[in-house]
Image (cartoon, helix red, strand yellow):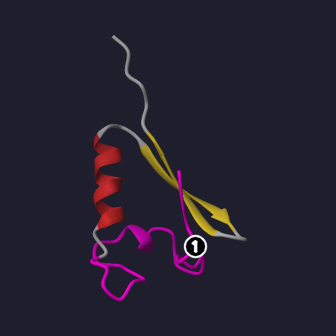
């Protein structure tokens, strides 16, 4: 689990996953969109949890498939 203090909660949650959206001067804005696509390709979910004193927490959930 990663806590990112630099992502303001005022942004719309889906905007954070838009390609080329970044809050960094030298960021490409491709990291979270790529991660979300990979998680979804494995039938998982990406969640953004409010963590008011430290920023936000991104939780990636991937199901375990059994035969």
**Residue at 59% across, 66% down:** 56
Residue 11 in the magenta stretch? The answer is: yes
Magenta stretch: dominant secondary structure: loop
- Looking at the rendered structure, the secondary structure element under dot 1 is loop
Relative image position of residue 45 (x, y in whole percent): 44, 46
Residue 23 in the magenta stretch? The answer is: yes
Left-right relation of 41 to 32 = left
Left-right relation of 14 to 40 = right
**Residue at 43% across, 31% down:** 63
The magenta stretch spans which residues? 1-28
In the rendered view, would you say 13 is above or below 24? Answer: above
Relative image position of residue 26 (x, y in whole percent): 30, 85
In the rendered view, would you say 28 is above or below 33? Answer: below
Q: In this orientation, which residue lies closer to the viewer: 17 or 5?
A: 5
Q: Residue furthest right?
A: 53
Residue tagged 1: 5
Q: Quadrant of the C terminus?
A: top left
In the rendered view, would you say 55 is above or below 57? Answer: below
**Residue at 38% across, 67% down:** 17
**Residue at 59% across, 81% down:** 10
């Amino acid at each position: 689990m990663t806590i990112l203090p630099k992502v303001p909660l005022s942004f719309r949650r889906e905007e954070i996953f838009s390609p080329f959206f970044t809050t960094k001067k030298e960021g490409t804005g491709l990291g979270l969109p790529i991660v979300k696509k990979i998680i979804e390709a494995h039938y998982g979910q990406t969640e953004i949890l409010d963590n008011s004193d430290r920023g936000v927490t991104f939780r990636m959930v991937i199901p375990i498939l059994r035969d």
